[in-house]
Image (cartoon, rainbow, N blue to C red):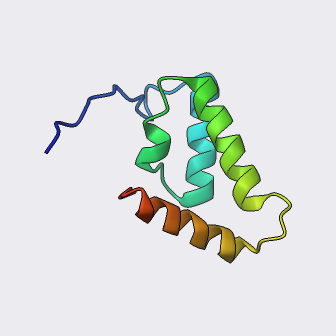
Amino acid sequence: MWPMPYIKQVSDEEATGPVKRELDKAVQRAGRVWNIVRIMTPNAEVLRASMAMYSALLHGESPLTRAQREMLAVVVSRANDCHY
């Protein structure tokens, strides 16, 4: 098994500016900050862009239903052996 790399993450208490805004939105969205979001906190622009893409993919206009999009996300995560 490979050792896990360590990435310093910004805590809720340390967060300011754009990172704090994104973390606050994450809590509003999901009731908590998931690790996939937290791991992007060192780079506010990456975090913002990733959350914008997520929002567009899951909530934007699409011929697919929300349930279909969620199912695709689960299948792709499983195929990629992602455990989040």
Q: Residue furthest left?
A: 1
61 on left or right of 27:
right
4 or 20, nearer to the observer? 4
6 or 17, nearer to the observer? 6
- Depicted 22 relative to depicted 81: above or below: above
- Depicted 65 relative to depicted 84: above or below: below
Q: Residue furthest front?
A: 79
The residue depicted at 16 percent of the width and 36 percent of the height is: 3
Q: Quadrant of the N terminus?
A: top left
The residue depicted at 58 percent of the width and 73 percent of the height is: 71
- Depicted 5 relative to depicted 71: above or below: above
Q: Quadrant of the C terminus?
A: bottom left
User: How many numbered discs?
Assistant: 0
Task: Name the image quarter holding residue 21.
Answer: top right
40 on left or right of 28:
left
The residue depicted at 70 percent of the width and 60 percent of the height is: 58
37 on left or right of 62:
left
30 on left or right of 55:
left
44 or 3, nearer to the observer? 3
Whole-percent x, y for residue 24 in the image: 59, 43
The residue depicted at 35 percent of the width and 58 percent of the height is: 83
Whole-percent x, y for residue 18 in the image: 64, 27
Whole-percent x, y for residue 76 in the image: 51, 61
Whole-percent x, y for residue 62 in the image: 83, 64
